[in-house]
Image: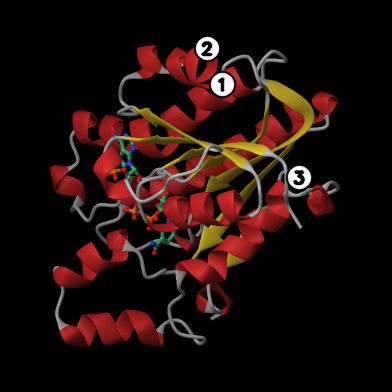
């Protein structure tokens, strides 16, 4: 399905991003992985794997990825898996807090796409995937920041898909329901069993595992998706059809 591509992945140290790195390396792709904590992925050893230690709040450091880690080669894909989730009543949402969640979930992705879209860093026909969420279209109390960022992704995907079509790029979003990752485990550790069960019951096919999401990402990164762009593909065990 996908092989011999060079892919840039943020959020590579955990959850969906980490699993995607493993999948791509198993399929002879080269991976440039961005993350803050190298210890979390010290088991990932491959000549095809390059780790760039970077806090995505440090926008001025992004050239390290493209001018140093890439080493003159070009990318074929970019997946923005990095993200933060928080539950906060609107009364506590200061401009700084909103800025913080937008920095990671949205602005870092746009800035990386700005670099990525330069001809010297990417091949024509490249594929870009942003991870939105079912929360990009559905609301939930306490999720003003998270929902706003995930909706913003849907807009930027459509606009950039049109703008970058001249280079035959595809730019798409996927919108998962709840997936069993460290992000979800943290959420579940903060709520009681009844609420965990309520969240599970909202997914007709139960909550997902990372292995449920990777095939869709692999498809979107592969040439098989060459006529799909500007879309938001839901992968949520039926959560959003109710
Ligand atoms: N899990 C779900 O149920 C679910 C559902 C819908 C959408 N999503 C979305 O899917 C994406 C991946 O989620 P996940 O569940 O795999 O989450 P996760 O396990 O918590 O991983 C999040 C990743 O984002 C990175 N990150 C966060 N802040 C960063 C920063 N300032 N600089 C650099 N990297 C940073 C983390 O790096 P560190 O290791 O350094 O913290 C980590 O690698 C997110 O965009 C999330 O919103 C998840």
Residue at 83% over, 54% down: 224
> Mark 1 CB in 8 Å range of ligand 1?
no
Marks 3 and 2: which is nearer the front?
Answer: 2
The residue that label 3 is drawn on is: 229
Colour scheme employed for the rendering of this structure: secondary structure
Closer to the camera, 70 or 163? 70
Residue at 69% over, 23% down: 122
Closer to the camera, 46 or 172? 46
**Label 3's element?**
loop
166 sits left or right of 154 in the view: right
Residue at 49% over, 14% down: 68
* Disc nearer the start of the sequence (3/1): 1
Please state the horizontal and vertical placement of residue 25, each as a whole percent of the image: 57, 49
Please state the horizontal and vertical placement of residue 192, each as a whole percent of the image: 14, 80
Closer to the camera, 47 or 137? 47
- Circle 2/circle 1 CB separation < 8 Å: yes
223 sits left or right of 48 in the view: right
Q: Neighbour class for label 2 at 10 Å: few (<14), some, many (≥20)?
A: few
The C terminus: image quadrant: bottom right
The residue that label 1 is drawn on is: 70
Task: Give the label on residue 131, or none.
Answer: none
**Label 1's element?**
loop
Task: Give the label on residue 67, or none.
Answer: 2
């Amino acid at each position: 399905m996908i092989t011999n591509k060079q892919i840039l992945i943020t959020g590579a140290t955990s959850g969906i991003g980490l699993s995607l790195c493993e999948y791509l390396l198993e399929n002879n792709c080269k991976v440039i992985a961005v993350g803050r904590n190298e210890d979390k992925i010290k088991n990932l050893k491959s000549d095809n794997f390059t780790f760039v230690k970077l806090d995505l709040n440090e926008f001025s450091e992004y050239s390290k990825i493209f001018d140093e880690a890439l080493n003159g080669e070009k990318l074929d894909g970019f997946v923005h898996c990095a993200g933060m989730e928080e539950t906060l009543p609107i009364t506590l949402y200061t401009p700084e807090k909103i800025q913080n969640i937008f920095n990671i979930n949205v602005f870092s992705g746009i800035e990386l796409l700005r670099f990525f879209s330069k001809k010297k860093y990417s091949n024509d026909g490249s594929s870009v995937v942003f991870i939105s969420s079912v929360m990009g279209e559905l609301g939930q109390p306490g999720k003003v920041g998270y929902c706003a960022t995930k909706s913003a992704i849907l807009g930027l995907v459509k606009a950039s898909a049109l703008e970058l079509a001249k280079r035959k790029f595809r730019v798409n979003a996927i919108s998962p329901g709840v997936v069993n990752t460290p992000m979800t485990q943290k959420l579940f550790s903060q709520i009681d069993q009844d609420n965990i069960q309520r969240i599970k019951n909202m997914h007709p096919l139960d909550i997902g595992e990372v292995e449920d999401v990777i095939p869709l990402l692999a498809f979107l990164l592969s040439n098989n998706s060459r006529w799909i762009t500007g879309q938001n593909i839901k992968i949520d065990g039926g959560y959003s059809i109710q």
